[in-house]
Amino acid sequence: MHGCYALVSRDLDLLEHKISMKVIHIISGLTDGGAEAVLYRLCKYDQVNHHYVASLSGYGKYGAKLVALGISVTTLNMQPGRPSPLAFIRLIILLRRNKPDVVQTWMYHGDLFGGLAARVAGIRSVVWGIHNSTLETGKSKKTTIWIAKVLAKLSWWLPVQIVACAQRAIDVHEAMGYDPSKMRFIPNGYDLADFKPGLDPQGELRAGLVSDRSIPLIGTVGRFDPAKDHVNLLDALVMLRDRGAVFRCVLVGTGLDSSNAQIVELIFQRGLVDHVQLLGQRNDIPCIMNALDLHVLPSAGEAFPNVVCEAMACGTPCVVTDVGDAAYIVGDTGWVVPPRDASSLAEAIASALRGVMNAEQSRYRSSRVRSRIKEYFSIERMVGSYTAVWSELNESQ
């Protein structure tokens, strides 16, 4: 894995001679997700290339944010599970009219429809984007698994390069039959000016979540989804409570509010009403991360969990399940446990809380977790690596 991260340094060296390119991104949608957030950051912080975005569905959360940056966004309004020949034709026309130097696609549906449309439009410089490392029945939709298998066969012909955000994703897709010679590993990057310590300087946000400073505040950020395995976290919290641990936990993300009867019932059944608070989707995630003493990733499946990097960039240590690249992200700065093992998760949280509630240990660990993100996962590294991939394609044409 270390060798793959070394590729990033090589990519940065290739940027001595910067040439502006026109890049059209084709993505499944622009809702509140990890890949969508990465696309937004890439467009925002790339000061060299010209970006255009085509969403197979709607604007979602990031459509308006991209437009606010001056990025042209086209929506094709396809419905989930219902491919539209008319939308496909519109996409071909869009590509022929704009004549991009590179077509960068995102996620399986974007890879398939965007890649095929680009080839029909006569564009060979197609780069696929893979942002998933879990393809198992019960965890992923059947149609998603089917498309991924189709893409495995097309990978030998359609894309010129395939970018994956996680080494685990590369391993999984090569095992499925994807062309290994085209795989490039580019970890997600983060703006350390946006995610940093000190964003809740007076502790007002934290005080609003838990009034007693001596009570540790645990949190997890991520939409309500089986892959995020909130049940695993809730079961671990029951074990902590039964051992006499004092804590408060907040759940943040789409679907994690009182209108979701399922999560409300899960909390009630476990007797955690006084310990767990639902905050729903928030627009102040950097502040939330600052308010937490500990961030927990209880997931059953991930590729490259953005929230772990975001928490660490804010100086907040993390307990993670060993999914995707989570273990590599935290390195020796955090705690790693097997997925779907509530007992191990409870032990790790208990161990972590003993450290984070010690002021001296907490300051030391906070500095270490932020330094790790700065060294390996900066926005400059990510932008430079993508630009290097696109530049190589341009030079080879």
Image (cartoon, grey):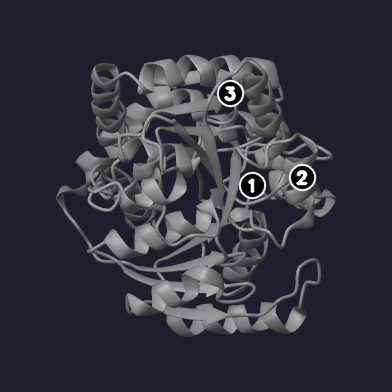
Q: Is residue 300 visible?
A: no
Q: Position of residue 318 (x, y in %)?
A: 45, 29
Indicate the amino acid at tag 2. Answer: Ser
Q: Which residue is mark 2?
A: 140
Q: Is residue 239 left or right of residue 35?
A: right
Q: Which residue is mark 3?
A: 322
Camera-nearest label, 1 or 2: 2
Compute the Cα span from label 1 to label 3.
28 Å
- How crowded pointer 1 is (Cα within 10 Å; few <14, some 14-19, many 20+) is rated as many
| Mark 1 / mark 3, whichever is N-terminal | 1
Q: Is residue 94 visible?
A: yes
Local SS, label 2: loop
| Mark 3 / mark 2, whichever is N-terminal | 2
- How crowded pointer 3 is (Cα within 10 Å; few <14, some 14-19, many 20+) is rated as many
Above or below, 275 against 341 in this view is below
Indicate the amino acid at tag 1. Answer: Ser
Out of 289 and 324, give the one closest to the viewer: 289
Local SS, label 3: loop
Camera-nearest label, 3 or 2: 3
Compute the Cα span from label 1 to label 2.
20 Å
Compute the Cα span from label 3 to label 2.
18 Å
Q: Position of residue 194 (x, y in %)?
A: 28, 53
- How crowded pointer 2 is (Cα within 10 Å; few <14, some 14-19, many 20+) is rated as some
Above or below, 346 against 106 in this view is above
Q: Is residue 295 left or right of residue 375?
A: right
Above or below, 361 against 67 in this view is above
* Residue drawn at 62 percent across, 51 percent down: 223
Q: How many marks?
A: 3
Quarter of the figure with residue 331: top left
Q: Which residue is mark 1?
A: 155
Indicate the amino acid at tag 3. Answer: Asp
